[in-house]
């Protein structure tokens, strides 16, 4: 799809103009494109039909995404525009392009973060939109097209503070869909249509081995990857695709079918490593940045360490392309050396004429040849810096003045001294000056020399790391290393110079002179072994790196950057990881790259498709991948048939249900070491009757066993994911490096991931067996194949058995294996259920407070105390009674003195109420921000049995209450009394007020900090 940049911009502009043409009523019309979106065929008669089939589904998907975001406008980030101007000129003078200035945020965000980014669609309004109806007033749609930021608007913008404020609010990002649109409008006659034409329908000729290359000798390739520990299916896959890469006679489209845990990434890394060795230009892409970085990281682990003295040699043939923030490069140090933006900056330093590789060496040689000249330059700089200072003391004379005076005195041939005492004094002073000069000259020269050596050594490392091997061959690296060793010997000799002036010492030292000549010789030899391109501009170096790279890593969407006529890559093969998760229309972007003859699609159509926002698009198979379509048409797939993740009892059901028992278990999962027990249970599979789990037991037992435990909690619904995350709070770490970590995500969020223990919440409980999203076999497959050692499924057995889908089979399978448990039959589980039900009463959404006048929030410490209390004598009922009265405005008539003489803010905020049997309920008033209002709420901190503990709690809370501003405190203390009741106060949100109020629970963070200490 090679075309001019202007043509690409014209195509992209057509897509933007279409979006600009939509009115609010158009956006909210769900059926706007319903009659224009047709089912995407399984086969196509021509490339034109192929591309046209995706156009209206893409438009509808963009339309649905915008509609979804605009309905939640009140949550969208927004900033005030405080200035701007029209940018005139350019290729299209009719475009309404502006450079705008945004009001700074408070607090200032971390460097590199941005409110709006390239490709963001924003809406400009005269007030912050709180709902969609606010757009019934005047508004302007715009898209961000550059930094500062630069935007293109749908209508002229008037920025005049005298006429009122103007706000920019984020709607969605159009980068990916805009790039797909460009790919769907190619130059069919002039572009590369080889791959597209080969996948229009099933073509056995595409799958056949080339007869001309059938006898190709792959023994060298086999030896090159023999140390990677590949199994037979992985080895065959790699060798077959290397053979396809070396074939010059036909186009190949190959599929690697990689079920969960079968080593897809390992296979791809071995294949890419082999392609690098034969210098086959390859693009490796995936749907997401995380997947791309993962594959790149794995390759570098294979590539590094080839040379002991140059462990990163060869990295210059590999480029990682993408956005630094989206790829989170700062958190991935391992791939920093191949990240393109970093490489350009590093090479720019090496290519710099004065301070780069060549300039530093010449300066160093100049220092050795004439250190006096370098020293005089140093003095000149120092003299300029001190020119404003004046000192008449002789001890502060400059060295130049000393030398000039000595010269004048020698010319006179006599000393103008009144006595021998004056003569001796003058001689001593002059000697001191000369010694000081020599010392400073020597120190400065040595320091300068050391800087030059360090700079040259840094350039050598940077050059063999970042230069492509086509420019810097192995011979050159050896010569550069030899030069560096000579340089280090010279530095050692120079550092030992300690007599006389630096220049005189160098002149009289034969060893230094000999080593210096050796350095010059080594430098000339290494310089002759490779050539540094004459490049200085950023865009020139960037183009050089991309064109000379053998392997390029990026997302499928980002590969569009390689399709301009300014960049000529040598890409012959495209490898798409997680290809079954990539919409077919998006995969068409890399498949049209100039020169591409071979494609390898790696994926598993039995797992989740790409996510689709529009239900209309979902029904017409817009989310279907090229991998899935070819598999449906019977295209041959190379199966990776050994799984190395799951315990055999976990893989048993998915293997039988989804993969026809084609998957074997790896030796590692068959060994006893792979069996790990948690909670002292012998089972691997568990199907629970009720949704519960006592994480603390796992924490305690994992600590006793000194095992590192990673727990993953999967729910099919985002709402429950959020609810579980809120429930867990910050009590458990999400950092995989910690001893115990818990990650809670949706099924979609867990695709590609794995944990030691997986807990699946099936959520649904009904008589008709409806299981919602879980009826999707692909989603079920993903959920069941994430666990390494233990898989626990929590749900209602009756509902699952009545579902009539794969979950019915799963429950029956668990029952037959004795892995189905009724929670009520287990005392510890029954107690956990009881505690869980009790805690469910004590939350803000509890039925207890459904009609209350006050909202009531609870700390984790209160929940822990409730569980510890023995449910005797109706104690729980008494607690509920007090809480219900509190929530309806009742207040205790007297002030409890349990706080003693506390002087902190807790004395103003904390309230202590009697419950029963010396139990004390500790609570305070806090502020909740909801629906653009600040509302007083009751915060229950704890219930304590002993009075002496209360001052300790108050002291701890004092530290936390100190974070409250005076404005916040005043609102907490403020009271509204009607009759005998105290009712909550409300205030409208001030948009200009700086605040950190939470939209859920303002003191949640404070509460979680209390988990660091125990009071009971």
Image: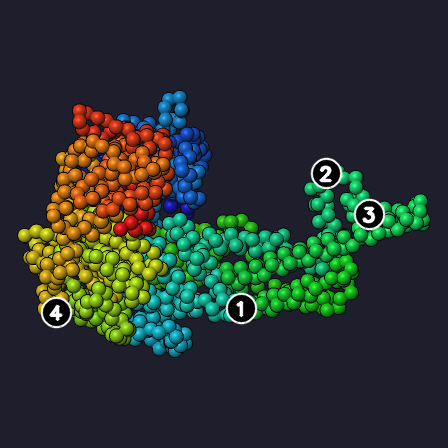
Q: Is residue 53 visible?
A: no
- Crowding around mark 2 (Cα neighbors within 10 Å: few <14, some 14 to 19, many 20+) is few
Q: Name the disc covering residue 309, or none.
A: 1
Residue 756, horizontal then vertical, whole percent: 27, 63
Tag 2's secondary structure?
A: loop
The mark nearer the N terminus, 2 or 4, is 2
- In this figure, which residue is indicated by the disc labeled 2? 389
Residue 585, horizontal then vertical, whole percent: 28, 52
The mark nearer the N terminus, 2 or 3, is 2
> CB under 8 Å between callouts 3 and 4?
no
- Mark 3 to mark 1 CA distance (whole Å): 49 Å
Q: Name the disc covering residue 402, or none.
A: 3
Determine the residue located farthest toward the left in the rendered image: 767
> CB under 8 Å between callouts 2 and 4?
no
Nearest-to-viewer mark from 3 and 1: 3
In this view, 341 is above or below 82: below
- Mark 2 to mark 4 CA distance (whole Å): 92 Å
The mark nearer the N terminus, 4 or 1, is 1
Q: Name the disc covering residue 817, or none.
A: 4
Tag 1's secondary structure?
A: loop
């Amino acid at each position: 799809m090679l075309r001019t940049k202007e043509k690409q911009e014209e195509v992209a502009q057509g897509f933007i103009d279409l979006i600009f043409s939509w009115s609010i009523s158009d956006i909210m019309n769900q059926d706007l494109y319903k009659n224009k979106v047709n089912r995407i065929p399984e086969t196509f008669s021509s490339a034109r039909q192929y591309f046209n089939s995706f156009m209206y589904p893409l438009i509808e998907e963009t339309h649905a995404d915008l509609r979804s975001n605009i309905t939640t406008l009140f949550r969208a980030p927004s900033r005030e525009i405080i200035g701007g101007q029209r940018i005139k000129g350019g290729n299209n003078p009719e475009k309404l392009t502006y450079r705008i200035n945004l009001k700074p945020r408070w607090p200032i965000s971390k460097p590199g973060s941005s409110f709006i980014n390239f490709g963001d669609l924003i809406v400009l309004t005269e007030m912050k939109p709180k709902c969609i109806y606010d757009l019934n007033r005047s508004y302007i749609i715009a898209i961000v097209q550059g930094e500062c930021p630069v935007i293109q608007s749908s209508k002229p913008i008037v920025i005049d503070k005298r006429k009122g404020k103007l706000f920019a609010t984020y709607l969605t990002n159009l980068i990916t869909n805009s790039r797909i649109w460009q790919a769907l409008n190619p130059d069919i006659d002039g572009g590369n249509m080889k791959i597209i034409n080969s996948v229009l329908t099933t073509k056995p000729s595409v799958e056949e081995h080339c007869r001309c290359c059938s006898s190709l000798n792959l023994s060298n390739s086999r030896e090159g990857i023999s140390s990677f520990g590949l199994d037979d299916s992985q080895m065959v896959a790699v060798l077959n695709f290397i053979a396809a890469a070396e074939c010059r006679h036909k186009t190949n489209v190959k599929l690697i079918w990689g079920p969960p845990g079968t080593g897809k990434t390992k296979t791809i890394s071995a294949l890419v490593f082999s392609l690098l060795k034969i210098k086959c230009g390859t693009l490796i892409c995936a749907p997401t940045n995380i997947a791309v970085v993962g594959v790149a990281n794995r390759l570098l682990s294979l590539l590094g360490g080839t040379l002991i003295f140059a462990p990163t040699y060869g990295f210059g043939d590999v480029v990682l392309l993408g956005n630094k923030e989206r790829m989170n490069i700062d958190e991935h140090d391992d791939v920093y050396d191949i990240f393109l933006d970093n490489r350009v900056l590093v090479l720019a330093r090496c290519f710099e004429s004065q301070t780069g590789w060549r300039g530093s060496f010449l300066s160093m040689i100049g220092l050795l040849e004439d250190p006096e000249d370098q020293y005089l330059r140093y003095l000149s700089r120092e003299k300029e810096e001190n020119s404003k200072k004046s000192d008449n003391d002789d001890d502060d004379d400059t060295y130049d003045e000393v030398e000039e005076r000595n010269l004048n005195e020698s010319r006179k041939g006599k000393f103008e001294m009144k006595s021998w005492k004056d003569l001796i004094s003058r001689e001593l002073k002059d000697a001191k000056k000369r010694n000081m000069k020599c010392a400073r000259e020597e120190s400065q020269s040595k320091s300068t020399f050391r800087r030059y050596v360090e700079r040259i050594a840094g350039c050598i490392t940077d050059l063999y790391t970042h230069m492509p091997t086509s420019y810097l061959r192995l011979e050159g690296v050896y010569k550069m290393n030899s030069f560096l060793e000579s340089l280090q010997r010279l530095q050692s000799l120079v550092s030992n110079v300690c007599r006389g002036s630096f220049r005189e010492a160098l002149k009289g030292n034969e060893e230094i002179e000999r080593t210096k000549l050796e350095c010059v010789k080594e430098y000339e030899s290494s310089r002759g072994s490779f050539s540094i391109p004459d490049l200085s501009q950023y865009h020139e170096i960037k183009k050089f790196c991309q064109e000379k790279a053998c392997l390029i890593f990026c997302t499928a969407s980002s590969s569009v950057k390689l399709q301009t006529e300014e960049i000529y890559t040598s890409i012959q093969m495209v490898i798409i990881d997680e290809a079954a998760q990539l919409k077919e229309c998006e995969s068409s972007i890399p498949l049209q790259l100039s020169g591409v003859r071979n494609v390898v699609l790696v994926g598993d159509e039995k797992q989740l498709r790409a996510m689709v926002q529009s239900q209309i698009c979902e029904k017409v198979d817009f989310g279907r991948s090229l991998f899935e379509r070819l598999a449906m048409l019977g295209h041959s797939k190379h199966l990776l048939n050994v799984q190395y993740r799951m315990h055999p009892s976990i893989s048993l059901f998915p293997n039988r249900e989804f993969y026809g028992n084609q998957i074997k278990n790896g030796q590692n999962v068959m060994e006893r070491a792979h069996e790990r027990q948690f909670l002292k249970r012998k089972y691997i599979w568990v199907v629970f009757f009720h949704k519960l789990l006592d994480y603390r037991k796992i924490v305690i037992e994992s600590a006793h066993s000194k095992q590192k435990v990673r727990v993953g909690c999967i729910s099919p619904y985002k709402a429950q994911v959020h609810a579980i995350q809120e429930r867990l709070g910050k009590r458990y770490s999400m950092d995989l490096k910690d001893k115990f970590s818990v990650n809670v995500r949706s099924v979609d969020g867990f695709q590609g991931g794995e944990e030691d223990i997986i807990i699946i919440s099936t959520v649904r409980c009904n008589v008709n067996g409806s299981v919602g999203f879980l009826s999707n076999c692909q989603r079920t497959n993903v959920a069941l194949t994430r666990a390494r050692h233990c898989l626990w499924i929590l749900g209602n057995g009756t509902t699952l058995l009545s579902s009539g889908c794969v979950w019915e089979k799963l429950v029956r399978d668990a029952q037959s294996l004795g892995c189905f448990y009724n929670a009520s039959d287990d005392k510890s589980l029954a107690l956990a259920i009881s505690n869980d039900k009790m805690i469910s009463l004590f939350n803000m959404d509890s039925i207890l407070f459904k009609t209350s006048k006050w909202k009531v929030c609870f700390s984790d410490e209160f929940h822990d105390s409730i569980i510890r209390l023995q449910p005797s004598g109706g104690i729980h009922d008494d607690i509920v009674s007090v809480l219900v009265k509190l929530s309806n405005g009742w207040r205790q008539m007297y002030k409890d003195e349990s706080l003693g003489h506390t002087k902190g803010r807790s004395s103003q905020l904390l309230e202590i109420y009697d419950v029963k049997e010396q139990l004390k309920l500790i609570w305070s008033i806090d502020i909740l921000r909801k629906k653009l209002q600040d509302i007083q709420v009751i915060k229950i901190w704890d219930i304590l049995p002993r009075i002496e503990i209360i001052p300790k709690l108050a002291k701890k809370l004092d530290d936390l209450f100190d974070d409250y501003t005076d404005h916040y405190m005043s609102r907490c203390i403020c009271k509204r009394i009607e009759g005998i009741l105290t009712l909550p106060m409300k205030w409208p949100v001030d948009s200009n007020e700086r605040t950190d109020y939470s939209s859920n629970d303002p003191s949640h963070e404070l509460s979680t900090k209390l988990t660091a200490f125990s009071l009971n």
